[in-house]
Amino acid sequence: MSDRDNISKEDSSARDFADLRRAVIATFSSSLARSVARVLLIIFVVDLYGIGSFGYLGEVAATVELLAALACLGLPKTIMAYFERERESARNSANLVSNALGLTMAVGAILSLAMLILWPILFPVNAHIPAYAAAAIFIICSTEMMLTLTRSRRIIKWESIVKGLVKPWGFFILAMGGYFFIIEQHDSEPMAVLIAAYFLSLIISALFACIGMWQILRDGQIVFGKFSIRAMANLAKESVPIAIVDAGSFAFRRIDIIILGIMTGSNVTGIYYLGQQLATVVEKMRHLFEPMAAPILAQTRSTKTIGEYLQKTCRWVFAASLGSAICFALYAQPLMALFDVYFAAAILFMSILLWGEIADGSSGLIELPIIFRNPLIASRNVIIALLIEAISVAIATFHFGILGAAAGFSIGMMMLAALRLYSAQKLYDMRIIDRSYFKPLIAGLLSIAVTLLVRDTLLSIPYIGMIIGILICGGVFLIALQLLGISMKISDNS
């Protein structure tokens, strides 16, 4: 390889990590804002609307968001690779924009109509859940596709605004306004008001996504081409394996709620949904990278370079996920008590649930190159893991209730992680895990030991003690990582 090629490769790598670092900062800010809104929403919804209504909200959201992910047909992940394939033809790229958006909207509309018909069968009449919520499928998938097209030009701003501010904070404000101005003053049905707030927040999110899409159209960064039924059909056929992967990533965190809801009741589902919402802080560690990692991996042709890139980012995600999971698990009881939920087995429940999140998050980015190069393998892995999760959740829930549902989820996630690692090694000779992964585990054990020594004393101070304890736990973990030679800086040399 010539000196010029080496310099070009180094410049490209530095640019990729600079883009990645910028995207992580934007996504982290978005996730932080979303997490604050989610915590406030859970506190007030559980207190004002009741844990039963919160459980039904979880079931509705699980259903429509799962079907919306299916309606996207995996295009949020694969559109980057399709653009790369068509980069020599401006006309083909423009046609791809039109057909991808049109296909998503068409499938979303069909699924919304089907769900509208089935709504009375899925949800009991006495729950007062309005059937128009089925239209959320169309709204969510259209919003996601518009944000994906915006992000395909390495513009992360609108995704951060919509997912970090507009949707979560809009839902929170609308839910609070609905309670104080509609339920209290007009004695309206709480569940109907809560779903209306959720639905309106989705509409507002779609409007902001439209603004972002319009800006890149106005600036000529993306252009609409011709709609073609045949092209949309071909795109759908090509995207089916990825649709399974994308829908599966949603299904892993929805099927457990649905099965638990069928086998127990809305109150138990509400507690589980609360734990799952707290666990999203750990889940989001992977998603800090994914929005920008997708176009980077789609445009990188060397599997050796991809392997080196994944080794660094997956280790970062593993360390960050492990540290945050330890903080959440050790303080699970007081955290859940903040939401007026007193669950004796909270530490065990959150530990089981969070272990599944660590397994999925730290291996999630490995799936991207498999999706771009061997989509059938990626879909096979998801189907196997999803079947194992569904069977495990059903059996374990029958015997152990809510703890069984968490265990079934974690079993599915560990199987998925194992399949991803096996596929990467077999297909591309990528060895993602090495001895450096033991260092975060050692740092985790040290943080657990220190936290257990001071936890009971700190918890004698309500609220402040818990916050101090979580900060100490996280601080010990980060210091231990630093001493062990693991840097959490995101750079080409980290």
Image: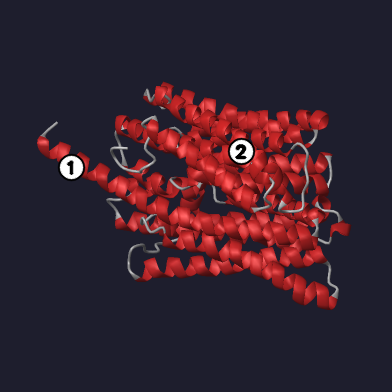
Q: Please report the residue visible at 67 percent of the width from the left and 45 percent of the height from the top.
A: 459
Q: In this view, does 180 lie above or below 394?
A: below
Tag 2: residue type? Val
- Which amino acid type is marked by label 1? Ser
Q: Is mark 2 on a helix, strand or loop?
A: helix
Q: Which of marks 1 and 2 is in front?
A: 2
**In the image, residue 32 above or below residue 380:** below
Above or below for 22 versus 262: below
Give the residue furthest to the left: 3
* Figure quadrant of residue 263: top right
Residue 297 x, y percent position in the rendering: 36, 41
Q: Mark 2 points at which residue?
A: 454
User: Is residue 118 shown to the viewer in this render?
Assistant: no
Left or right? Give the position of 12 relative to 32. Answer: left
Which x, y percent locates residue 70? 60, 47
Label 1, residues with CA under 10 Å away: few <14, some 14-19, many ≥20: few
Which residue is label 1 attached to? 8
Which residue is nearer to you in this view: 340 or 176?
Answer: 340
Near-viewer residue (409 or 384): 409
Residue 435 position, x and y percent, is: 41, 22
